[in-house]
Amino acid sequence: MFGRIFLQRTYVRIFIEMGEAIMGDSSDTDLQIINSFYQNEEACIEALIAMKWPTGFVCPRCAYPRCTRLTTRRIPLFECGRCMHQTSPLVGTIFERTHLSLMKWFRALELFLLPDGISAMRLSQVIQVTYKTAWLMLHKIRHTLGESDARVLLSGDVKVNSDQYGRNPSRCQFPHPHATAVVAGCTLTESGEPELVKIRLLPHKRGDGRRPNRLELDEFITRNVDVRTSAVQSFPLAFRLYTPLRKLVREAWDSLKSTYVALGSKHLQAYLNEFTGRRQLHLAGTKETQQQRLLKLLSMCVSVTAISYHKLIARQLNSPLAAAA
């Protein structure tokens, strides 16, 4: 009995991992187009140091600006000239305690910025790490986007929809058994198009056409909108939603299902953060180069402390982020 259950779970896991590799999120052609901007470990280290201390070294203990650089290790240490405290540029970033080279990390960041991202299986093949390592790297990046998103409130002209993730919005009359309730909010450009977007999952409301109610919309607004500087319009009814925002929720579904075979409720919020975060990084379109977008993402990674594997897998459904998520 137990042996049969174990085999079934093993087959499911193999199916999902094979599916990620077969369905593919990034073709070989796409991966060949991307040339790494940092060709060696030294270049990655210097880029990280410049991002960590853009105006020069500052001691994290006493704020003294002078230091001695110790280069006896792979990642240099900086020793404060006053209190003699030694610190690494990796401390307080998602790279802290990593055993991987920064080149692998930077390559993962570049591939993460592909239009539909990259799966853990494909990433493990490209940068030559184990599947578990690639999975953890991508979730640390998603955690970074989620934490960065939680620090920014929607303000100005704000629209909020009571919607569902995982269903075709053109078929309102047919509830999908696996659709999950979400609250989606956005600010608008002058032309009325969504600009900054947030999508929050309500995993306890799944299937049977269940949607966020007015109280849950109000809670989203309280946590994610600067009500003092905003004009907020809510759309709680299924047949009367803000159409451009509704389309974005469908785009999130299309994008994520094209890259990943199956997404459970436990980490679905992280993948929604990935979609909205990457969309924000690409929002400038052709005005920004791939390297500029990479530097923006790197800046987020430097400002957010890494989440450990044990905390990641222990995270509860739709757990709150550090700020106002």
Image: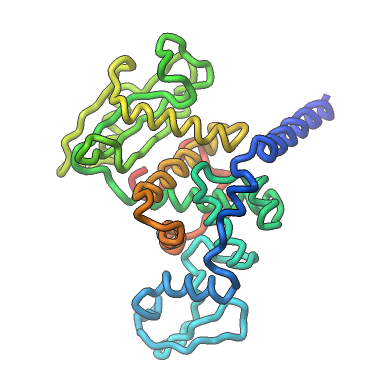
Q: Residue 14 placed where, x, y %?
A: 75, 36
Quarter of the rendering occupied by the N terminus: top right
Q: Is residue 145 left or right of residue 38?
A: left
Task: Work out whether residue 184 or residue 242 is closer to the camera in this orientation and state it.
Answer: 242
Q: Is residue 168 left or right of residue 237?
A: right
> As displayed, is residue 87 above or below residue 134?
below
> As displayed, is residue 108 above or below residue 240?
below
Quarter of the rendering occupied by the C terminus: top left
Tell me the residue at 40%/48% (across/down). Answer: 282
Task: Work out whether residue 157 or residue 211 is closer to the camera in this orientation and state it.
Answer: 157
Q: Residue 324 placed where, x, y %?
A: 33, 45
Write down the quadrant of residue 126 in the picture: bottom right
Write down the quadrant of residue 118 in the picture: top right
Task: Work out whether residue 311 or residue 162 is closer to the camera in this orientation and state it.
Answer: 162
Tell me the residue at 42%/17% (across/down). Answer: 210
Q: Residue 200 placed where, x, y %?
A: 39, 35
Residue reaching furthest top?
173
